[in-house]
Image (cartoon, rainbow, N blue to C red):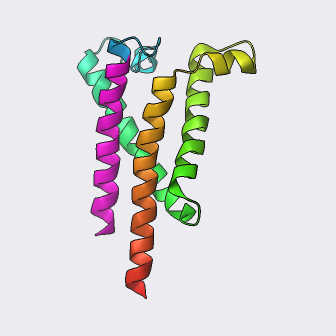
């Protein structure tokens, strides 16, 4: 019962993230392209954007599988706190990598608030499910 929850949580989080990133890009909430890192690779540079989104989706599934597995061990910390901290770390790292600001304040000013909210919500979903399933399995074991 635990393995299907892990897979479906990661899959749904990846699909929601990919669709939300497309939404943010279409309505100019982010100035960068979510599939831009794939375009820089020499292997997939001439491939259709649909394939690039699929590769992004697969990368997100793997990321969320690892995240889910790692965050089961944070069951003593409230999921809301964990997700906010992780969202801040992820968004700062992504924005820092993409925009390459001159200073820390420049990095903070370049953060997209809708992107931060999106990552916080998705991370909360993954963390909440991981912690719930961990606690559920511990209660069943008793």
Q: Is residue 86 magenta?
A: no
Horizontal relation, residue 117 to residue 103: left or right: left
Vertical relation: 136 (above or below) 80: below
Vertical relation: 12 (above or below) 41: below
Vertical relation: 130 (above or below) 92: below
Q: Is residue 63 visible?
A: no
Give the quarter of the image for residue 77.
bottom right
- What residue appears at the point 32 percent right and 51 percent down from the top-left corner? 9
Q: Quadrant of the N terminus?
A: bottom left
Task: Estimate the x, y position of residue 109 in percent, counting from the top left.
Answer: 64, 16
- What residue appears at the point 44 percent right and 78 percent down from the top-left corner? 138
- What residue appears at the point 42 percent right and 46 percent down from the top-left corner? 64
Q: Is residue 9 magenta?
A: yes
Predominant SS of the magenta segment = helix
Q: Quadrant of the C terminus?
A: bottom left
Question: Range of the magenta residues?
Answer: 1-24
């Amino acid at each position: 019962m635990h393995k299907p929850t892990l897979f479906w949580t990661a899959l749904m989080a990846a699909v929601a993230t990919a669709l939300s990133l497309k939404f943010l890009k279409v309505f100019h909430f982010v100035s960068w392209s979510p599939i831009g890192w794939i375009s820089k690779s020499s292997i997939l540079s001439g491939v259709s954007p649909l394939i690039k989104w699929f590769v992004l989706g697969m990368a997100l599934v793997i990321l969320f599988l690892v995240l889910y597995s790692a965050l089961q061990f944070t069951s003593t910390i409230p999921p809301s706190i964990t997700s906010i901290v992780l969202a801040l770390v992820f968004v700062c790292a992504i924005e820092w990598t993409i925009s390459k600001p001159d200073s820390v304040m420049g990095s903070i000013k370049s953060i997209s608030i809708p992107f931060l909210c999106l990552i916080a919500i998705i991370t909360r979903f993954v963390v909440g499910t991981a912690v719930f399933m961990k606690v559920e399995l511990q209660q069943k074991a008793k």
